[in-house]
Amino acid sequence: MAKPSGGSTVQKVESLVRPVVEGMGLRLWDVVFEKEGPDWYLRILIDKPDGAAMDTDTCANVSHAVDPILDAADPIEQSYYLEVGSPGLGRKLTRQEHYDLLKGQKVAVKLIRPDAAGCREYSGTLVGRTENTVTVATPAGEVQFAANAASSVRLADDEDLFS
């Protein structure tokens, strides 16, 4: 599995591409800079504010718009592949704005270590995130955990696709 890297690199890239993405009427969901095998990937994840499906033409348009800006600013020392895409159905919640936007939606949680009840995985309805505490309403009741105790919190809106 790839390890996310380049915190300041991500911040630099985000500050460069956010105005472009938002100027195109889109939402910047996340910027990820990670190494996979010998290669580095800069992934710009975009979303439509109205929740409409993302299409490849929109991704290509954003890629063409941000590529010259990134080339001119040159915020990344090594070579990398630029990918622009959707965060997908099982999108990962990484920022406070994600939690605010998706309150009331179904989520799947994986904790780094089992909690006091011995559980590492939960699914339920996202109640919200305050400071560093995430609350999820599960069939067994509300569960709270520190945001940094989760290896992932993902939207679980794809569960009915195959039924």
Image (tube, rainbow, N blue to C red):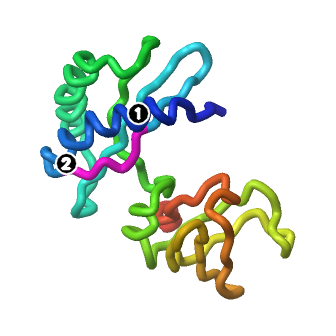
Q: Quadrant of residue 124?
A: bottom right
Q: Residue at x 36, y 50 (%)?
A: 29
Q: Is 133 on the left or on the right of 92, as rendered?
A: right
Q: Is residue 28 magenta?
A: yes
Q: Which mark is residue 22?
A: 2
How would you rate the neighbour count of disc 1 (Cα within 10 Å): few for under 14, some for 14-19, many for 20 or more?
many
Q: Which mark is residue 43?
A: 1
For the N terminus, which image quadrant?
A: top right
Rendered position, 84 above or below 21 = above
Q: CA distance from mark 1 to mark 2?
A: 16 Å
Three-letter amino acid code of the residue under disc 2: Glu
Secondary element under disc 1, as helix, strand or loop, is strand
Three-letter amino acid code of the residue under disc 1: Arg
Q: Nearer the viewer, residue 106 or 39?
A: 39
Magenta span: chief secondary structure: strand
In magenta, the rendered stretch is: 26-31
Chain-order first, disc 1 or disc 2: 2
Q: Is residue 92 magenta?
A: no
Residue 147 rendering spot, x and y as whole percentages:
62, 62
Q: Residue at x 30, y 48 (%)?
A: 28
